[in-house]
Structures are given as C-alpha cells and as structure tokens.
Image: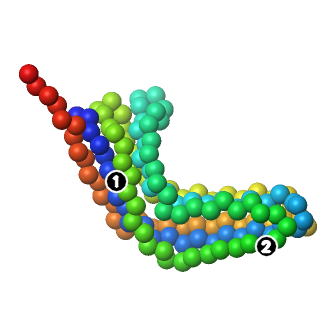
Amino acid sequence: MTAGTLTITASSTYSYQWSTNSLNTSLVTSFGSVTLDIYGMDTMNHIPVSAGTNYDWWDEQTTGQINFDFAFDVTKSASTSLGVTHSLVYLCFVAIDAHVVGMGWPGSLATSKVSATVPSISYEFVPYPVLHQ
C-alpha cells in the first residue's frame, strides 16, 4: 500500500424534524446533522486525521419565539477526500447527530429528530507518484 488521496462518495436519503419553543429568554437549543466522514485511526485507537462534509445541519438557539423545520426523503450525494498512508486504518461513515437543550417547561422545549439510509457508497484512491532513480 502506498500513500495517496482517498475520496469517498455516498448517496444518502434522510429525513429530519426539529423545533424550539422558548418563552422570553429561557435557554433552548435544537441541533442536528447528517455528515459524510473519514477517520484515520492508529493502533492506539487515536484519530490523528479526519475529513468530512455536511449533507445538512441545523443549530437553532433563538429565544422568545417558536421555530421549526422539517423535510422528508431528501436525497443528496456528497464527497470528501483525505490524504492517506499505510500507517493508519481508515473508517468512513454517514453519521447522524441530534440533540436538544432546554430549561424545562414552562420555559423552553426543544425537539430534534433525524434518520438516514445509505443506498450507495463508493471510493476512489489516487496514489501519490513515487520517484525512482
């Protein structure tokens, strides 16, 4: 194996729903994301290199109002690249993340929900040129 550039491409279909309901200035946060990520892991389970790209994300923190958004069966393709060597193991993921913060009711409420399917994922490896004398 030689050093080169690894490019991962994945098609993903995802759905999401989020809402925030904050009375006056009560803390509220709704966050979520769908990402395509590559992680390079060493023998000690450390991750010294990584690359990623977003399919979609939100980070809503507005107080004193009600906000929401949703989408169903969104299909997108994304790619991300990383320089790789033979000294690491490379893992690739379509990852989803959803979390909320609220100060309780009455005060604030938040929701965050996301799901994804990955019907296809592919890779391309382009080796770096090696010069010989």
Question: Please, what is the three-letter code of the amino acid marked with disc 2?
Answer: Ile
Residue at 10% across, 25% down: 132
Point out the image quarter for the N terminus: top left
Question: Please, what is the three-letter code of the amino acid marked with disc 1?
Answer: Ile
Inter-mark Cα distance, 1 to 2 = 38 Å
Q: Secondary structure at mark 1?
A: strand
Colouring scheme applied when the structure was drawn: rainbow
> From the viewer's perspective, is residue 21 above or below residue 38?
below
User: Relative to residue 51, is residue 21 drawn left or right?
Assistant: right
Which of the 4 image quadrants contains residue 103? bottom right
Residue at 79% across, 60% down: 28
Point out the image quarter for the C terminus: top left
Residue at 44% across, 37% down: 49
Which of the 4 image quadrants contains residue 84? top left
User: Relative to residue 130, is residue 91 drawn left or right?
Assistant: right
In percent of width and height, residue 8 lies at 34, 53
Q: Which residue is mark 2?
A: 66
Q: Which residue is mark 1?
A: 8
Q: Is residue 84 visible?
A: yes
> From the viewer's perspective, is residue 72 above or below residue 52?
below
Residue at 74% across, 72% down: 67
List the single residue furthest toward the top: 133
Crowding near the residue tagged with mark 2, few <14, some 14–19, many ≥20 C-alpha atoms within 10 Å: some
User: Relative to residue 73, is residue 133 drawn left or right?
Assistant: left
Q: Secondary structure at mark 2?
A: strand
